[in-house]
Image (cartoon, coloured by chain):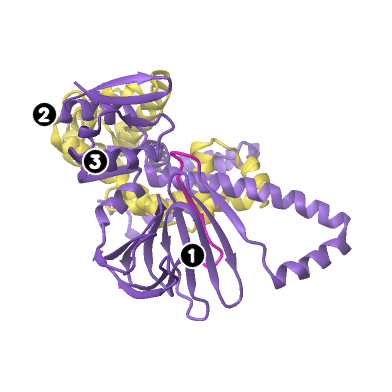
Amino acid sequence: MNTHGSGQHSSHSIRSQAADWLAQMQNPDATPETRDAFEQWRNADIRHALAFEQCRSLWLMTQELKNDADIQRELDSARARKKSNARNNRWYMFAAAATFLVISVGVFFQRSPQPIEYSTAIAEQRLIQLEDGSSALLNTDSALQVRFTSNKREILLKKGEAYFTVAKDKQRPFEVVAAKSSVRAVGTEFNVALLNHKLTLDVTEGIVEFKTKTVTDNLLTSKVTQGEAINFHSGDSKLVIQPANAARISAWKARKIYFSADTLEDAIAEYNRYTRKKIVILHDDLKHQKISGVFNIDDTDTFIFSLEQLLDVRVERHQGKVLIMKR
Amino acid sequence: MPLTAENLYNTYRASLLKYLIGMLPGGRQDALEILHETYIRLLQHEDLERIQQNPRAYIFTIATNLVTDWLRRRHSRRQDFHDSFDELEFPCDEMTPIRALNWEQSLAQLKQALMGLPTLTRQIFLLSRFDELTYPEIARELNISTRTVERHMSSAFHALQQSLEDFL
């Protein structure tokens, strides 16, 4: 479609000129000379005007991605970078004034790198880019600590859930420690959740080595490969390999919750991870009803409404809580 | 064939419509509206001789201009309506199933292009796009030069163009 009156090559170069001009014109400090040069370029050929206008449409079209979960997450990490950069700048200024102190502290840091803490609030998710190219997507109400040394990449999952994408580095294994368990990988993708004394590991790519200790201090180990999962409660005495719950994991990564014939009790416990307005089931015999579906984690009202429709329950809101009772 | 606005319009009508459907969230309905507006503008154009040098580029420029106006109006409208606008927007989905698909495909491609950018480029683009930070502000925050911000923006735009290359 773009071959009219011009070869592929020239339409390509017009396009990259248009991209350059748009980038320059969006700078509020562009000089009058630059603006004149731009007008000249645009008026020189109608194909210039078209390419520029198209580029501007694309810029406007991306506005529609504002509510996209992945874009939101990337934006959050851009904001975080902004903040940490501002911190670094301050640190740098202080360091310039006290060089001696910085050198001695610097040596100390090199020997034993300071662990870096990351956490999320309820309903927040955060993508953490690690220095080795790996990343951790932190789910709601979670916390982890990162400590990289020359021979090990160590992550401590203190609470909650995270999805790890591990960059390959044979010299430095990547190890996630959670409670008494550890997951060791070289290059792979997996999800770890530490909730209510239960550790869940789902491997979505590659292979990892899982280690844990029972209450009687027996060491249990197992290889877990792509498509497999382990659910380990703190009282368990052996490891059982199960199929990974890929649907649940891809759902949370897109800010959604996926239920597949879960009991209402489990479903509510899961949903409550994402909301401050906690949902409480008042009648025990409701707890075992089954529920399936996909829900947005940011939309409690719709979730509650669906429960009312699906399960024939009555909902009351009371002092910041949502109470579920028999009709 | 005499050079008339009508002839030009008929020649490019089909490809214009296809083009517009991919660029507008309202799909076929809005695309037709802009197509007709393009025709009206073409009729008002006095100097058809000038257009003849590259009729396709002229007509597509008129149409793309209308698209950018439309998108800009939509965004300012959006700010007035806040969240409720989303619901108002899709009253008759079943009637024109083609529209959501094409627009969503375009958006998906743009998203993919952004996700595929080097991290720093993507972050600069997103801060500029959604936090509406100016280049000097971004440069200050990230401790780089304004010229570098400009270069990252340019390469982000270029990636967006490439993602919809077959279509532009």
Q: Is residue A34 visible?
A: yes
Q: Amino acid at mark 2?
A: Met
Tag 1, which secondary structure? strand
Marks 1/2 same chain: no
Disc 1 target residue: A177
Mark sitting on residue A294: 3
Q: Colour of chain A?
A: purple
Q: Which residue is mark 2?
A: B95
Magenta stretch encompasses residue A266: no
What percent of the width, then of the height, locates residue A182?
45, 68
The extreme bottom residue here reads: A171
How far, Cα to Cα, is label 3 from label 1?
30 Å
Q: Is residue A39 left or right of residue A107?
A: left
Q: Is residue B19 visible?
A: no
- Residue A5 shows which numbered tag? none
User: Which portion, as a residue range, is magenta?
Assistant: A121-132
Depth check, front residue: B120 or A312: A312
Q: As rendered, which of A229 and B162 lies closer to the eye?
A: A229
- Which residue appears at 32% of the width and 59% of the height? A7
Which chain is indicated by disc 1?
A
Say which chain tag 2 marks. Answer: B
Drawing shade for chain B: yellow
For marks 3 and 1, the one nearer the N-term is 1
Say which residue appears at 25% left-offset and 53% top-offset.
Answer: A247
